[in-house]
Amino acid sequence: MNSQHTRASKFLSYVLRHRPDAIGIALDREGWTDIASLIAAASKAGKQLDRRLIETVVANNDKKRFAISEDGLRIRAVQGHSTDRVDIRYVKKVPPEFLYHGTATRFLDAIRKEGLRPGSRQYVHLSQDVQTAVAVGQRHGKPVVLKIDALRMHREGFVFYLAENGVWLVLQVPWGFITG
């Protein structure tokens, strides 16, 4: 992805996941907003977006963070929201036996005390593979990968969701389900 695409992706993440009000757009309960309105609001805020750039960012984002509606008129971030106005109805799924969470070693003491919590987001994000978890952990410092006994959690009543981009979501992970 070139620098223009990277800047556009970061901007879209910011407004579609965290601060739609920063440019004066609204997201519905499922996180959707009108692409034409997004382009106009971004322009007023000094950010140049057009439909082609948005479609390129959506198609080429390696984490598949965004989706365009079937009719091509709306866009949303598929997960990672920190705004309580969005409440995407994810499909409940039975998780695989183990899932993984990448974090930094500096957070381990807090995780041992409180387990994994979503922080400013709505859900704890988990991956199905170690490589993705390592990449996530590296963004926060010296990485460590935590192995989550997801199927046991599910059997004990925890609800898991699978976002469109393959990220597993759960409200929390108590320390007792973290095996490594």
Image: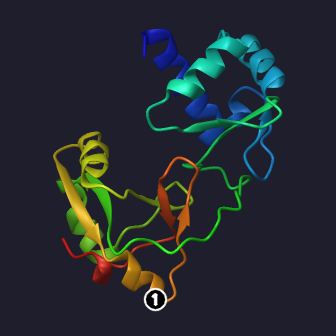
Decide if residue 104 is in sight here. yes
The residue under the point 75% across, 17% down is 39
Comparing 24 with 9, the one in front is: 9
**Residue depicted at x 27% and y 75%:** 178
Choose top left, top right, bottom left or bottom right for residue 70.
Answer: top right
* Image quadrant assignment for residue 159: bottom right
- When the figure is inspected, residue 53 is found, relative to residue 77, above or below; the finding is above
Q: Quadrant of the N terminus?
A: top left
Q: Residue at x 47, y 54 (%)?
A: 167
Residue 149 picture location, percent across and down: 32, 77
Q: Quadrant of residue 35?
A: top right
Please, what is the three-letter code of the amino acid marked with disc 1? Arg
Instruction: Please report the residue visible at 40 percent of the width from the left and 74 percent of the height from the top.
Output: 173
Q: Count the marks: how many?
A: 1
The quarter of the picture where the C terminus appears is bottom left
Residue 85 percent coordinates (x, y)? 74, 53
Residue at image mark 1: 155
Report x, y in % for residue 29.
78, 53
